[in-house]
Image (tube, rainbow, N blue to C red):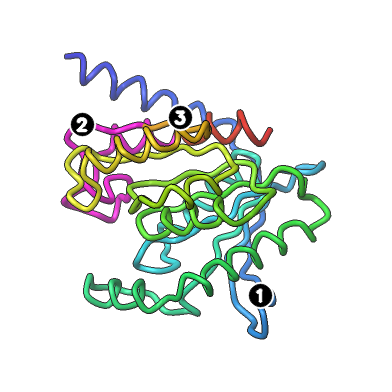
Amino acid sequence: MRQIIALAALSLLAIAANAYALTIKVQDVTFPSGTETIGGYLAVPESAGKHPGIVVIHEDWGLTDWVKAQTRRLAEHGYAAIAVDLYRGKVAYDPEYAYDLMVSTPPERALRDMEAALHFLTTLPNVNKEKIGSIGWSAGGKWSLLLAENDLFLAACVINYAPLPADPAEIRNIRAPVLAIFGSEDRSTPPSDIEAFENAMQSAQKSIEVKVYPGASHAFENSGNTLGYREGAAEDAWQRTLTFLDEHLK
């Protein structure tokens, strides 16, 4: 009975959020990253004024329709969001290819691409360049944290079921507040790793908020994950993400 009430409450929250969603504009964009030109998917509110920005970082699968949908949802909530294409147009449709794409992406290139996307946002006249954050899922969560370790001005970082750093030096470099979201049944990030990361962040006096969803496994937020998707947990994670981003970016 409690579960039914909770799901009903989440549904009402989602309906209310949609009722107040902003009108947005979306487009495919290109921008320089080092000597290369790379692509991204940009979604921005059409309302006047300067909006906080978000660098959206895709899962192992690449810049999929699901990632683009999350980018639009962020824009509807008032963010200028750009999903950066770290795979240069490649999208995986099976786990083996997704893994190959992920491991063949050099971290230094991913960092350069994310910084390029962040810089692109700061050049837009309707973006508040002082308020830019990042969000990523799975491998994208790892890269979101990599950006937080290396960018002095990142104002918020969200990671979803991502591999976690164990090197104290990496953790000391994190300056942005971090929201870390996991599923308790995710074998790629066991509870011991999550606890160690949270303790290390607290010991280094870093701002950290951790949420672990009981019974959820890897990629539980992705509705395309037919076996692992958990609607209630996914919606709660989304609302938690918006609350966190609003606190630090608005």
Boundaries of the magenta span: 211-238
Q: In the rendered image, which quarter contains the N terminus? A: top left
Residue bearing mark 1 = 30
Residue 18 drawn above or below residue 174: above
Q: In the rendered image, which quarter contains the C terminus? A: top right
- Label 2 sits on a secondary structure element that is loop
Residue bearing mark 2 = 214
The front one of 20 and 65 is 65
The front one of 83 and 130 is 130
Q: Which mark is residue 15?
A: 3
The front one of 202 and 25 is 202
In the rendering, at what x and y percent does residue 9 appear?
35, 20
Q: What crowding class fits label 3: few (fewer than 14 Cα within 10 Å), some (14-19), or many (20 or more)? A: few
In the rendering, at what x and y percent does residue 201 appear?
44, 36
148 part of magenta stretch: no
- Label 3 sits on a secondary structure element that is helix
Closer to viewer: mark 1 or mark 3: 1
Left or right, 37 with respect to 209, comes to right
Amino acid on which the number 3 mark rests in the picture = Ile
Closer to viewer: mark 1 or mark 2: 2
